[in-house]
Image: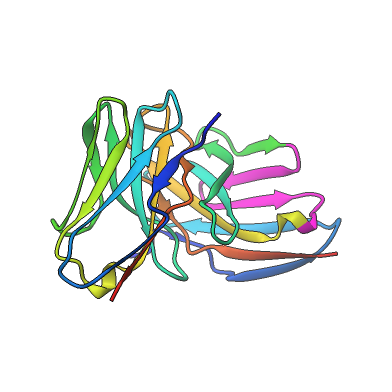
Amino acid sequence: DQQVKQNSPSLSVQEGRISILNCDYTNSMFDYFLWYKKYPAEGPTFLISISSIKDKNEDGRFTVFLNKSAKHLSLHIVPSQPGDSAVYFCAASAGTGNQFYFGTGTSLTVIP
Amino acid sequence: DAGVTQSPTHLIKTRGQQVTLRCSPISGHKSVSWYQQVLGQGPQFIFQYYEKEERGRGNFPDRFSARQFPNYSSELNVNALLLGDSALYLCASSQGAANQPQHFGDGTRLSIL
């Protein structure tokens, strides 16, 4: 039972353009969301988080949008750089625990 | 500052054996979580420990166990290994017990022959 879904296994974007990665969830109890970036042979690196009391959070080139009614979140990277090429995971947790449910990841390729 | 460190980096075992994986959290972090990641999937939650107490357990059999020590480091034990236990095992630490970003180590790659 996949509670967090990333329906696009891969995405290619030109350098300098916007990258938009999408994530859908089914559990309405999820109230805290994270995005991670993962390079091969390394652990996931935390990028940005958002709480369900917000609908947007920005950190430099990274912005996360949360649409609670649609149970959808997205990560925008502007401008995209070749070093952003990696697998991106979204993750969600509910309530007082720090148990995160992860999506299956989207592989982003930024073309120079 | 040192990040989350895991040992060993790679391990090869045979079916039926037992394995212990180790994790040292970021200094000041009191919560440690363990995840299993198989190829093509996202990490799947196994355990969370906070202040040496188990705070959560994922849908894994009793062959999986863990503990957290007074210095907040942690061990994951897996008994009676099966071929399906072959995976990347990730440890993550966070300052608090809930609604906190988790910071991951580079994992232990476990291969079962």
Picture quadrant of residue A50: top right
Queried whether the magenta region covers residue B54, the answer comes back as no
Q: How are the residues colored?
A: rainbow
Q: Residue B57: horizontal and vertical position, in percent?
A: 23, 47
Residue sitting at 62 percent across and 52 percent down? A74
Frontmost residue, A67 versus B71 = B71
Residue sitting at 69 percent across and 43 percent down? A63
Picture quadrant of residue A86: bottom right
Q: Which residues are magenta?
A: A60-82
Residue sitting at 68 percent across and 68 percent down? A11
| Residue A30 in sight here | no
Count of numbered marks: 0
- Residue B15 lies left or right of residue A71; in this view the side is left
Q: In this picture, is B38 found above or below A56?
A: below
Picture quadrant of residue B99: top left
Q: In this picture, is A30 found above or below B41?
A: above
Q: Quadrant of the N terminus of chain A?
A: bottom left
Q: In this picture, is A51 found above or below B86?
A: above
